[in-house]
Image: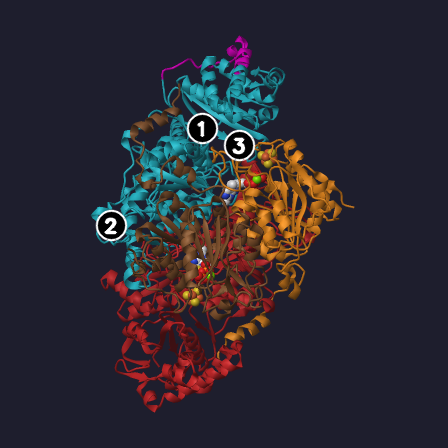
Chain colours: A cyan, B red, C orange, D brown
Amino acid sequence: MDDLNVVIAGAAGEGVQTVGAALADTVSAQGYGVFSWQEFESRIRGGQNSYSIRISEEVRNAPLMDADILLALNEGAVKKYEPLLKQEGILLAEKEMRQRTIVIPFTKIAEKEFGGIIYANTIAVGALVATLGIELDTLNQILARQFADKGAGVVRANLAAAERGYSLADQGCIDMCPWGLPKRDMRSYLIGVNEAIPSAAAYAGCRYMSAYPMSPSTAIITFLAREEEHLEIFTEQAEDEIAAINMAIGASYGGARAMTATSGGGFALMVEGVSLAGMIEAPLVIVVAQRPGPATGLPTRTAQGDLLFAINSGHGEFPKMVLAPSDPKDAFHKTVRAFNLADKYQTVVIMLTDQFLSDSRFTVEDFALEEIGPTVYIADPQSIKDYKRYRLTADGISPRLYPGQSEHLVGVDSDEHNEEGHITEDLSKTAVAMVEKRLAKFEGLRNEVSPPEEVQMEGADIVLVGWGSSRQAILEGLELLNKEGIEGGMIHFTEVWPLPIYTFPRGKKYWTVESNATGQLARLLRSEYGLDFTGSIRRYDGLPLTGEYIRRRFNDYSGGV
Amino acid sequence: MDDLNVVIAGAAGEGVQTVGAALADTVSAQGYGVFSWQEFESRIRGGQNSYSIRISEEVRNAPLMDADILLALNEGAVKKYEPLLKQEGILLAEKEMRQRTIVIPFTKIAEKEFGGIIYANTIAVGALVATLGIELDTLNQILARQFADKGAGVVRANLAAAERGYSLADQGCIDMCPWGLPKRDMRSYLIGVNEAIPSAAAYAGCRYMSAYPMSPSTAIITFLAREEEHLEIFTEQAEDEIAAINMAIGASYGGARAMTATSGGGFALMVEGVSLAGMIEAPLVIVVAQRPGPATGLPTRTAQGDLLFAINSGHGEFPKMVLAPSDPKDAFHKTVRAFNLADKYQTVVIMLTDQFLSDSRFTVEDFALEEIGPTVYIADPQSIKDYKRYRLTADGISPRLYPGQSEHLVGVDSDEHNEEGHITEDLSKTAVAMVEKRLAKFEGLRNEVSPPEEVQMEGADIVLVGWGSSRQAILEGLELLNKEGIEGGMIHFTEVWPLPIYTFPRGKKYWTVESNATGQLARLLRSEYGLDFTGSIRRYDGLPLTGEYIRRRFNDYSGGV
Amino acid sequence: MITVEEFKSKAEIQWCPGCPNHAILQALKMALVELGKAPHEICLVSGIGQAAKLPHYLKCNFFNGLHGRAVSAALGIHVANPELTTIVTTGDGDCYGEGGNHFIHALRRNPDITVIVHNNEYYALTLGQASPTTMPGEKRSLQPKGVEIAPLNMPAIAIAHNCTFVARGFAGDLDHLKSLLVEAIKHTGLSYVDVIQPCITWGIHPMRWYKERVYQLDEEYDPTDRDAALEKTEERTERMPIGVLYRSSPLSLYASRFRKTVTRRPLAELRPLDREKMAGFLSRFRSG
Amino acid sequence: MITVEEFKSKAEIQWCPGCPNHAILQALKMALVELGKAPHEICLVSGIGQAAKLPHYLKCNFFNGLHGRAVSAALGIHVANPELTTIVTTGDGDCYGEGGNHFIHALRRNPDITVIVHNNEYYALTLGQASPTTMPGEKRSLQPKGVEIAPLNMPAIAIAHNCTFVARGFAGDLDHLKSLLVEAIKHTGLSYVDVIQPCITWGIHPMRWYKERVYQLDEEYDPTDRDAALEKTEERTERMPIGVLYRSSPLSLYASRFRKTVTRRPLAELRPLDREKMAGFLSRFRSG
Ligand SMILES: Cc1ncc(C[n+]2csc(CCOP(=O)(O)OP(=O)(O)O)c2C)c(N)n1
Ligand SMILES: Cc1ncc(C[n+]2csc(CCOP(=O)(O)OP(=O)(O)O)c2C)c(N)n1
Ligand code: SF4
Ligand code: SF4
Ligand SMILES: [Mg+2]
Ligand SMILES: [Mg+2]
């Protein structure tokens, strides 16, 4: 079967997300690879948003823009999204607005039969599930789970609405639709990074998270708050981002693995804290979910615009690590790694995600938990006689104890300090030694960094170099280019600072692919590897990179090569 | 005459700075080139600090470390600073503590004859002035001016103390001292950057400054506060740095040229505001007076550690300029330039100074005011019909009006916006156009940037590449190296972002010289010019670069070449 | 004469249909009409949030800045151009959470601006999290067991700092709110209006619930009585007073030192120092 | 038995000789002795300033963080290890200026920590600028014509938010201060002690001036009377009351939800989730 892309569209408040998630879960339960992504406006009601679900037999975790099926919950949604619908695509709407429309009067029925238009979306998705040939029961199980906290009444009403919609999709509808999704055997996880990261944090032994709400990062602390007791993580909504990071640093000093999460603007407020963590050598994990800036920018859209800002964040010089996971499984592993390395090197690890990653759900076949787990680096107080928090060592790593752990006293200071953490004015010996100690850790970190992923490098003429969330899109872009006769390879970074010792194969034409306007990765790689780029594909309209976009821009710029 | 380096040392609270400034002024009035710099601890009383005054016939605005004369106000000061004294140097102290000591019992006399040790420093400087063969009256005029706001009584007492000290330096003292400073004709300015910058701001038409105290930047707003009425600049002490920058941005939007100043940690808190100014296109000048980080670091010491942080400050992508003046005259010109370019391109201009620059005073022969002055870019409302704050133009610059200037309405928005400043969700057209508009200004800015200064490039084998405050030290380093037979040139940047279109001459060995530990300029130039460096001289003990330091480290690393 | 129509903005309103924010917008327009203000004489300043979108919906000059920083921006705007009528429209998250420090220090400065807080007791735009004014016990997404900490009482802080005009309005009482806003904008000094603005999307009580509880302070209430005013700020659950809670005379007026000595004109109109004056000024650094 | 000597730190004290900060340090040591605390049971937390250097001068665990952020760091430390006696030592600039927002929101949370503010009415370390508590009229370097804005009254804000323990101490009355600190540290919940700490370098009044004005609240004073307490916070110039200004019972206690449900033990002692549990947890994302 070819991949099927179903787009559900409607205004904020019409339940696009609810039924989008329900349909994605249903299809996943039916045994298919599912990838969903969302685009929506920064408002609570109105506007037009979409929830796209890509369905495939194999796992294809990348967005498609063109739709095979469009379920439009209102007329405006048809107007806005109909251009995405392929010629032979199908519209599911209240009215016949083009050829190949399955008409389901979901709003009218919701009002008349269910006493409120809030059921329209469920009726519509019921009809869509029927059209796709999936059993009603599969959807119903999902809906029952989804509405469980809202009470039995709400569950019952939604099941009835789904059933009503299901029954409306008569044989005519099903016949009009060339696609059916018979049950398959595959079982997998359907998960987003904002679920994978908090889950992994818990697995890594994170005990403390403070944050201030900011899209698209808020879901991380929301997840942990809900599971607070279960996972034994204390969560706190801070009064602002500055409090969030300083609280987390305090907790970290206090012995708790700690984290915070935010987006660019909130991170801007945290960078003094980043520098503090660097100075006092407090482990800390920070998730920065990027969205287009500057300033408030496009709060609900996606970008990779904070790479150099993150790498250079904080005044002064200190070691720090920046990771940029490419999908939820990678994010799961990187999160555990982030906590371990933050602890080992007693410094900040930043995880750069973005709105695209944050609001998408990916099919993960297996989490490979056996490959990763928490490693504890807190020292044993018994083994230490004369404890000094900043004891000078060859690798710059001093044994870390936490206050109250034993009779050893743990003192930390944001001023330049001596081995005991006291303010120093001894420049030539102490201050210099401490600068060198911290930078020695940077060298250590550099050795931990994984090399970039190389794909199809042999024989490749051109190489697309990307980072973070664009991995799948780039792979698909290469496939499309390959069909046009272009031999392309990929080098993909998910660990972007420090950069690993790495040599770019010679004789290739390198292009960066980035969701930003200035080519930040290119600038970074030029400075670290002296690498020259032939071209760069940049997207900065707030929408995610796709294989098709990459193919098109590559051809635009290279004149088809 | 060879240059003479006089160091005055004592504890905080003993008036080192007061008499250091008085001596510097006196020597300047005597017609010599004077350069002074200070190093001191972060405390109000106690510790040991120094004020170094380099005296020369020509203008030599660079620090020396070795002292010809050490005036030590207490015994601890002798201990700490005596190692700096040259073999043939002279100590002026209360007790004979080494050969070639001029003994003046200033403390005892202050207590006995003047009723308080607070006059000890003035007595001592009186003796020193006599020893150098300067007339008492020259000192007295300076002292009278210096103590003027403290009232006539204080002035009188200090003049008497100076006279007493002057009389104590008998012929024996004068004979012991091989140096004399007969009156010369030269007249010049003795000024620091924290005086030059606010003066220039006033000249540039700055009307608003808000800041939060932070060493070493506080003197800028202090200067303007004192002159508020005279210069017609409104100054406000903010409750924190975030308020400081947002107030200044508000004032800028309101039509007032506006600025703020801080150091690294305070700047870290401002970077969200930097991004705001970039987005709403508000002109803004920010002085960042660097000191060693991370975090609180060494609050009274110097560093050039925030170069990449400043350049990459703020989330998202937007044009910004970063200037790094090398001395007060340069700072004066750059400040006017900063206000003009901030206005022309409607964005942020950051001026990077540092503690060394901030606490030093330089001899300036002439300010060349005729070369520079304010240029106004506010548009004429009469000439505009349908006003749109963000009208799309080829160069990205939209006509700027301020609110209330006319009936035209001026709307600005931190969200991505349309031409009228209203929030937009139109991605493909409006958002993309606005990103490109802002980046077009970056291209414009790039064309404004001055190329780096090239010195002795012809025939140079090795080239020292530096930025900002180290200019004079590098020149002196080259002189010293030259004496050792090394043909060296200099390329010096005082405009560091955007970097100009520039080609580094080929066939040279390039070294960066920087007051930081990671070689930030090198990283920057590598990324922009693909330049490779042979070596790098880095100082990160909180003390300023000097010619001698550069010479020594060059030889250490290059094995004497 | 200016009419409400003239304040209509071209921007599409993004609030939920039926949200009481619409009423606040309407009340503000009516107040401006009553005060005879023209669009170009007004500058609306906001941060980020639903409330903070208001400046887009009223034709005038506007500055929609960063979350939490509206009051700071307004201080700068006000000094730069004291002729403008500067009004901050902000939310409880914007002004009491992220921006708390700026507001308490603005109280000390007493600028001649008006601050209108749309207090819906949530972070509405970010999907209904608790704000500093959410009632204890309420379950919110980050407090699934209910908010366990006390609400911030900013009106009490304002009163304790002798804010010269502290009022509470109700978005469900348009006329009363309009009169309050007229008074607030006319007032010289910081005028602060905390508006009860039920959020119909995230809130747990219907408008009716508020209507049953809100009452107007009557003539017997003495707004110069500080203790009484402080008590009134705490009536937030069973009965909810609206009206001017407190008035006092100011210690200071932000920027008055400047306006007294320099000008009430926009700073942009001042002429720059000319070269000769600058040369004279620099001579103070000249030796000898 | 622990003695004051045991709290002696190796770090050299950088305060001016004769500064009343020395007395605060001494009082704190004496209070800790009286409470029978050992150095490793204590964690002192500070920001940046003269006051904020205190943790270096008392042998114990310490966290000397960023200017203005001590209270935030202390909240994290307290949750991470509730067994520690967590005490913030901060200045008026640190806590009321840069850190104002954190303190007012900490009041809402009511953590079981003690906050001691060395209130010298200046930014002493940065050379004596006005702070949020500098008296109006005083000439300072950035206010050469005198401070024109009202001081921040943080004790009043604390009282208005039902802070459970609000006291004012005086660095010139060592025994009284020690007793206050003993009470404050013993107290469960946020205990807040604003200490009058004349700065002998930047201040305009000698110690004597303060001694003439300071008086101890006597037994007749009822610290549960909120209006009276608010009035006492305003006595700052002619007469200066010291003692416990206010006590109340808390709405909440920061982190109590966690301590109730999980443990009073340090979080570092909790065992991580094992692989199987994690696998089980992840199964919720599993389809079908
Ligand atoms: C620095 C920063 N942090 C967080 C956010 C995310 N954010 C946007 S609006 C908002 C809350 C707004 O709450 P409120 O001011 O009460 O406005 P409402 O939406 O309730 O009207 C937050 C946290 C942001 N834009 N910037
Ligand atoms: C972010 C930041 N801004 C400014 C400073 C500079 N600074 C250091 S101490 C201080 C004021 C301290 O005042 P206070 O807390 O009253 O302490 P005091 O010195 O009076 O005891 C300031 C502004 C800083 N270190 N960090
Ligand atoms: S979410 Fe609430 S506050 Fe925001 S517009 Fe909707 S009803 Fe109004
Ligand atoms: S400056 Fe003031 S507060 Fe600081 S140590 Fe000296 S006397 Fe004490
Ligand atoms: Mg709100
Ligand atoms: Mg203070």
Task: Classify mark 1: helix, strand or loop.
Answer: loop
Q: Amino acid at mark 1?
A: Pro
Q: Nearer the viewer, residue C112 or B285?
A: C112
Can residue C126 be seen here?
yes
Residue A183 in the magenta stretch? The answer is: yes
The residue at which mark 1 appears reads as A63
Residue A292 shown in magenta: no
* In the depicted structure, whether residue B524 falls above or below residue B139: above
Judge whether residue B323 can be spotted in this image.
no
Q: Residue at x 60, y 51 (%)?
A: C158
Residue B278 screen position, x and y as percent: 52, 49
Q: Is residue B446 left or right of residue B12?
A: right
State which region is magenta: A162-185
Q: Where on the image, by quarter, is ligand 3?
A: top right
**Where does label 3 land, which residue?**
A40
Foreground residue, A561 or B243? B243
Residue A89: mark:
none
Labels 3 and 2 in the same subunit: yes
Residue A257 drawn at (x, y percent): 34, 41
The chain identifier of the residue carrying mark 1 reads A
Secondary structure at numbered mark 3: loop
Nearer to us in this view, B124 or D148: D148
Q: Give the x, y percent position of residue B451.
A: 44, 59
Considering only order in the chain, which callout, 1 or 3, is on the residue closer to the N terminus?
Answer: 3
Look at mark 2 in the image and give the residue it sits on: A395
In primary-sequence order, the first of circles 2 and 1 is 1
x%, y% of residue B449? 47, 57
